[in-house]
């Protein structure tokens, strides 16, 4: 296939997809929605792979990205002259980031062992008072009439259920300056978060109408005042203020979507 033929086909495909979006915006036909999901499923998969090195299974991230794609399709307004891929990218990234933000990693301990651990702690307290020292595991097993192996298992999982504080001192520290877990943890580079936020912001900016984008660029990238922007564009300062306000509101909606 020649380059000209390929370009013509791409243009036809793009126009066909735009026609589908226009029809879906009017009818909300589930069949059209499914067709659009299939057409852009590769975009969702691509965005999921971008976040695949953060400890989450790729299949889970792909599912989250697909949810973002569905939201983008449902909310997209084809009459605004914005490329859907640009709009969808911002929405999908927002959905994935929300997934990570809302994800809580917890250690789940079987209820039987939690109850046994609570019971054993009462035995430990009683034995400590009676013996005047901390009891051994065997003494705890004998006192509670629980097999030694189950006592060990309950205490091991009990420690997992009650994780150590980051401020807890470790034995490796000297007497005057005990080390804590926090001393061994590296700090998160704030530039990484800013880089990701910048990427999200730039993607959202590209979805704005040309006039809104231009005013935000002049205001926040060029550092011009509203009065200077008004003179440069030949409009009133009040008009600049209104467009800037609408643009910032739209940006907030896109980023938090």
Image: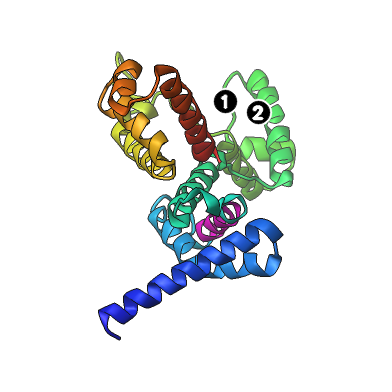
Badge 2 or badge 1: first in the primary sequence: 2
Judge whether 64 appears above or below 134 on screen: below
Comparing 230 with 252, the one in front is 230
Label pair 2/1, CB-CB below 8 angstroms = yes
Q: Position of residue 67 (x, y in %)?
A: 59, 55
Quadrant for the N terminus in the image:
bottom left
Mark 2 secondary-structure assignment:
helix
Residue 248 is marked as: none
Mark 1 secondary-structure assignment:
loop
**Residue 61 is covered by the magenta coloring:** yes
Magenta stretch: dominant SS?
A: helix
Q: Position of residue 78 (x, y in %)?
A: 54, 54
Q: Residues within 10 Å of mark 1 (few under 14, many from 20)?
A: some
- Please report the bounds of the magenta region as a residue range: 60-71
Residue depicted at 63% across the width and 63% down the height: 23
The residue furthest top is 176
In this rendering, the count of numbered labels is: 2
**Residue 135 is covered by the magenta coloring:** no
Comparing 58 with 80, the one in front is 80
Res. 131 image quadrant? top right
Structural distance between the alpha carbons of marks 2 and 1: 7 Å
Residue 124 is marked as: 2
Residue depicted at 60% across the width and 49% down the height: 75
Res. 144 image quadrant? top right
> Residue tagged by mark 1?
134
């Amino acid at each position: 296939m020649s380059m000209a033929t390929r370009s013509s086909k791409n243009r036809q495909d793009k126009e066909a997809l735009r026609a589908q979006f226009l029809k879906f915006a009017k009818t909300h036909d589930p069949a059209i929605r499914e067709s659009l999901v299939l057409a852009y499923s590769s975009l969702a998969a691509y965005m999921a792979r971008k976040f695949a090195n953060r400890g989450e299974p790729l299949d889970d991230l792909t599912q989250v990205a697909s949810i973002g794609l569905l939201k983008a399709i449902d909310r997209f307004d084809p009459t605004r002259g914005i490329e859907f891929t640009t709009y969808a990218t911002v929405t999908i990234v927002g959905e994935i980031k929300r997934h990570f933000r809302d994800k809580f990693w917890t250690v789940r301990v079987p209820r039987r062992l939690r109850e046994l651990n609570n019971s054993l702690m009462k035995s430990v307290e009683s034995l400590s008072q009676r013996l005047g020292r901390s009891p051994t595991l065997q003494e705890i097993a004998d006192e509670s009439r629980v097999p030694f192996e189950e006592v060990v298992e309950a205490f091991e999982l009990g420690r997992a259920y009650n994780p150590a504080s980051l401020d807890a001192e470790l034995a490796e520290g000297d007497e005057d300056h005990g080390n804590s877990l926090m001393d061994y943890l590296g700090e998160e580079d704030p530039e990484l978060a800013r880089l990701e936020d910048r990427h999200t912001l730039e993607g959202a900016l590209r979805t704005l109408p040309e006039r809104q984008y231009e005013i935000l660029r002049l205001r926040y990238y060029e550092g011009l005042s509203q009065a200077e922007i008004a003179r440069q564009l030949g409009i009133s300062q009040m008009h600049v203020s209104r467009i800037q306000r609408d643009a910032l509101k739209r940006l907030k909606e896109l980023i938090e979507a």
